[in-house]
Amino acid sequence: MHVNLIVKYKVWFESEKGDFVLGPGGIELLKAIHETGSIRKACEKCGWSYKRALNYLNSLEETLGTKITVRKRGGRRGGGTVLTDEALRLVNVYSEVCRKIEEGIHEVKFKNIRGSGSHHSGESEPHRFTHL
């Protein structure tokens, strides 16, 4: 019996104390804000409540000690939200870390793992790699 290995991983950032700061969900929210120019639209896209997103963004800004978004209140002309340069750098660093991990995963050579009693033929079969 052949068992194909699927490598999965999750990347998140922690503080120096080991406290969670930012992970895939937060990055997805930041990217959606950047794409839509709106926290509300980003929430719809990511499946977050507006209150949860505001609390998350405020907490993230407090933890990092820097502004992540610039928010303009709505009104006749409408509001909007843009990411700060610092937030864009954070998203880019996260994306770069994931890209490097993905490159490393693809360099790894896996051998087939057989069920008990099976013999390995030495043939290599393709393996799937998945990014969470």
Image (cartoon, rainbow, N blue to C red):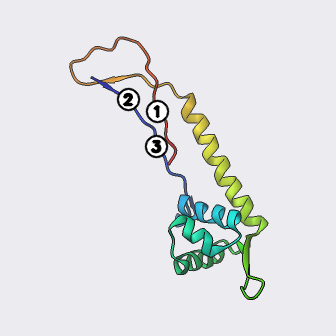
Q: Position of residue 111 (x, y in %)?
A: 42, 22
Q: Position of residue 11 (x, y in %)?
A: 54, 52
Q: Which residue is mark 1?
A: 128
Disc 2: CA contacts within 10 A as few (<14), some (14-19) or many (>=20) = some
For the point 40% across and 32% down, the residue is 5
Whether residue 118 sits left or right of residue 44 in the image: it is left
Residue that mark 2 sits on: 4
Residue at coordinates 58% horizontally, 39% vertically from top-left?
A: 102
Q: Which residue is mark 3?
A: 8
Q: Kindly report the distance in space between the C-alpha atoms of the residues bearing marks 3 and 2.
A: 13 Å
**Residue 6 in view:** yes
**Position of residue 123 in the picture relative to residue 74 (left or right):** left
Taking 23 as reference, is 62 left or right?
right
Of labels 1 and 2, earlier in sequence is: 2
Q: Percent from the top left, x then y, of residue 52? A: 52, 77
- Few, some or many C-alpha atoms within 10 Å of disc 3 (few <14, some 14-19, many ≥20)? few
Give the residue type at disc 2: Asn
Element type at mark 1: loop
In the image shown, does 110 or 130 lie closer to the viewer? Answer: 130
The residue sitting at 44% across, 17% down in the picture is 124
